Image (tube, helix red, strand yellow):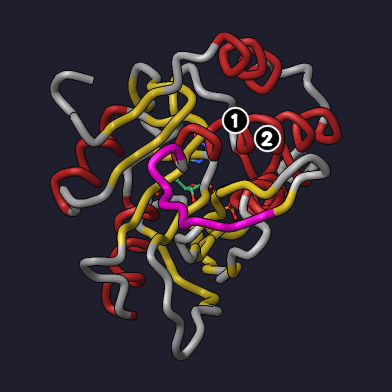
Amino acid sequence: MADWPNLHVSQHPAVRHKLAILRDEHTEPKKFREVVRELSWLLGYEALADARTQPLQIQTPIEPMAAEELADRIGLIPILRAGLGMVDAMLELMPTAEVWHLGLFRDERTLQPVEYYNKLPDHSHVDLCLILDPMLATGGSASAAIEVLKQWGAVKPVRIKLLNLIAAPEGVREVISNHPDVDIHCAALDRQLNEKGYIMPGLGDAGDRQFGTGKNS
Ligand code: PRP
Ligand code: URA
């Protein structure tokens, strides 16, 4: 994106295909969770394209060779609840990553984030923190999560990246103005928020759609 160099919107056809399934109101929670996982894998693959490697000497059945292994130590920070569905795919990509759960919900009236759970370790040495949350709406939750990480100690040279499935321009603006050092990777940049703070066209409530809640509200 020309205006937002920190924003990376996937252009991959497979991502666009899977997004249509995710957005469709007829997609049931089981399929929804499956596609959240698949999209997370694809997005994570793109977001980790600049991860560092180190030399590794191995022996193939034919001869010795100089190979590479991942060198970056990674912390995955899923934002509860909806970010939970992105964890397994990221662990498949980066099996040695640590997972630090952070519970934030958005107050329905004020749209402000409320922190209710924090499982960041007392000490850890990572090079990269990846925040996982399917939705970037007002940007309040993402900004709060980044603030928590920075207060905890994720400051330069530690890098922070945000992985979202769908982002709204309002949220991108909010995160980039508060945290210009953070890269945002998403599958789609949608039009705008509605009066209730939902992304249009979006996919509805990512937590409810994964976990089958909210049908009676
Ligand atoms: C959703 C979503 C983000 C947040 C985005 O979570 O998963 O965390 O809203 O909105 P924002 O950018 O305006 O802060 P929600 O608060 O609905 O909690 P849930 O995951 O427990 O359903
Ligand atoms: N949270 C969601 O789950 N969906 C939205 O559209 C906005 C915030």
Residue bearing the label numbered 2: 36
Residue that carries the numbered disc 1 in the rendered image: 42
Q: Quadrant of the C terminus?
A: top right
The residue at 66%/17% (across/down) is 18
| Disc 1 CB within 8 Å of nearest ligand 1 atom | no
| Residue 136: % across, % down | 41, 40
**Taken as a whole, is the magenta stretch helix, strand or loop?**
strand
- Res 24 → quadrant: top right
Using the image as rendered, state which of residue 184 and residue 79 is in the foreground: 184
Q: Nearer the viewer, residue 67 or 112?
A: 67
The question of residue 54 being in magenta is answered with yes
Instruction: In the rendered view, tell whether residue 156 sits above or below residue 182.
Output: below
In this picture, which residue range is highlighted in magenta? 49-58
Question: Within 10 Å of the Cα at label 2, are there few (<14), some (14-19), or many (20+) other Cα atoms?
Answer: many
Point out the frontmost of discs 2 and 1: 1
Residue drawn at the location 23% of the way across and 36% of the way down: 6
In the displayed structure, would residue 117 be above or below residue 204?
Answer: below
